[in-house]
Amino acid sequence: MATDAALDQQEFRKALATFTTGVTIITGMAPDGTPVGVTANSFNSVSLDPPLVLWSLAKSSRSLAAFDASPYWAVHILSADQDALSNRFAKSGADKFVDLPVETGAGGAPLLAGCAARLQCKTTFKYEGGDHIIFVGEVVGLDRSGVPPLVFHGGKYAVATAKTDALAFSDGAVYDAESSFTENFSGYLLARAHFQFYSQLRAHIEGAGLSDSEYFVLSVLIIKEGRSIASLNALFSYTGHAITPALVAQLAAKGLVRTDGAGVDALCYLTADGRTTTVRLIVAAKAVEADMMAKFGEWETVSLKNLLKQFILHTDPGLAHPWSA
Ligand SMILES: Cc1cc2nc3c(=O)[nH]c(=O)nc-3n(C[C@H](O)[C@H](O)[C@H](O)COP(=O)(O)O)c2cc1C
């Protein structure tokens, strides 16, 4: 381990880069009314009571004079999709605010939109910190959006995901992300997740006296009615469930669907009873989903849905889409 007094600059930077941070943009208003802003990952919390935070600004920064002269500044904790905004405010001198919608915060500091959180601050201390000035400020106002934050690690932008411990199944088997192929095979994981999740819905579907195929038909008719039996069948071809005139006749006999026409070209509509039954099932399905997602963090829920959408996109052989077909 290098402890030499003449520290290698490169090594120092590389060692610091292993420390993972969020990314902020600090904005302020110069006394002449010019807005200033810099990207900073030196931000940190200092004290809860009083509420104090700090950040440090390079003495070479063109914004230094403005931050030095005006006591108010706003910290924008950037959200995961604001890396372009971070880059914009990391370029020295350019007119960083062009075309950006801003509100006015305490002391005139511009407030940017779409952040994970914003803290409006008033300078309480300033310290010399080598080639930087350390600003300590009292937080006088804040807001928080709940969107996931942007992360900076090893000189690159990243996103944060929670680290999960090995998961134990009910039979005592332990799922370890690094273990054997079968347990870690995405096909197995997707299938098991689907069937376990769907079995909770099935209780409601069976409770309504319906088969899975019948439920599928109702669930897309509520999105759009007047679909032909052939188009319903095309929608569900990937599931292995056939939507046939006989199946639709069953739904009609139950008083849930009415048809117009004959054979696979017959157009299908929900009856009033069909609509009520479907809405009830959708409410139940959403409750099952909400129960499930409550066990996840907000960011994990967003990540899961994004990853599933990507999975669907990259494996889509060109299927019809229930919301557009
Ligand atoms: C992720 C990231 C973090 C940064 N953190 C800081 C910081 O904490 N302090 C600082 O002075 N500059 C930091 N910078 C560099 C400034 O954003 C950059 O020098 C800025 O352009 C200064 O603007 P100005 O000269 O117009 O004031 C960072 C840049 C990036 C990309």
Image (cartoon, rainbow, N blue to C red):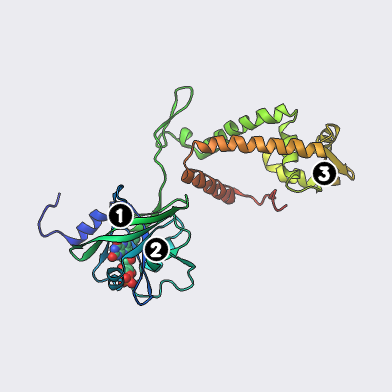
Q: Position of residue 252 (x, y in %)?
A: 85, 35
Res 243 visible: no
Q: Identify the mark nearer the N-term, 2 or 1.
A: 1
Question: Which residue corresponds to the image point at 30% horizontal and 50% vertical from the top-left?
Answer: 50
What amino acid type is highlighted by mark number 2?
Ala
Check residue 53 in the rendering and tell me which mark sits there, or answer none: 1
In this view, the residue in front, 164 or 129, is: 129
Q: Label 2, label 1: how many angstroms apart (C-alpha)? A: 16 Å
Q: Identify the mark nearer the N-term, 3 or 2.
A: 2
Question: Which residue corresponds to the image point at 25% horizontal and 71% vertical from the top-left?
Answer: 60
Check residue 106 in the rendering and tell me which mark sits there, or answer none: 2
Q: Position of residue 102 (x, y in %)?
A: 47, 67
Mark 3 element type = strand
What amino acid type is highlighted by mark number 1?
Val
* Neighbour tally class for label 3: few under 14, some 14-19, many 20 plus, Cα within 10 Å: many
Q: Quadrant of residue 24?
A: bottom left
Q: Position of residue 173 (x, y in %)?
A: 45, 25
Q: Quadrant of residue 80?
A: bottom left
40 sits left or right of 324 in the view? left
Check residue 4 in the rendering and tell me which mark sits there, or answer none: none
Q: Which residue is mark 3?
A: 269
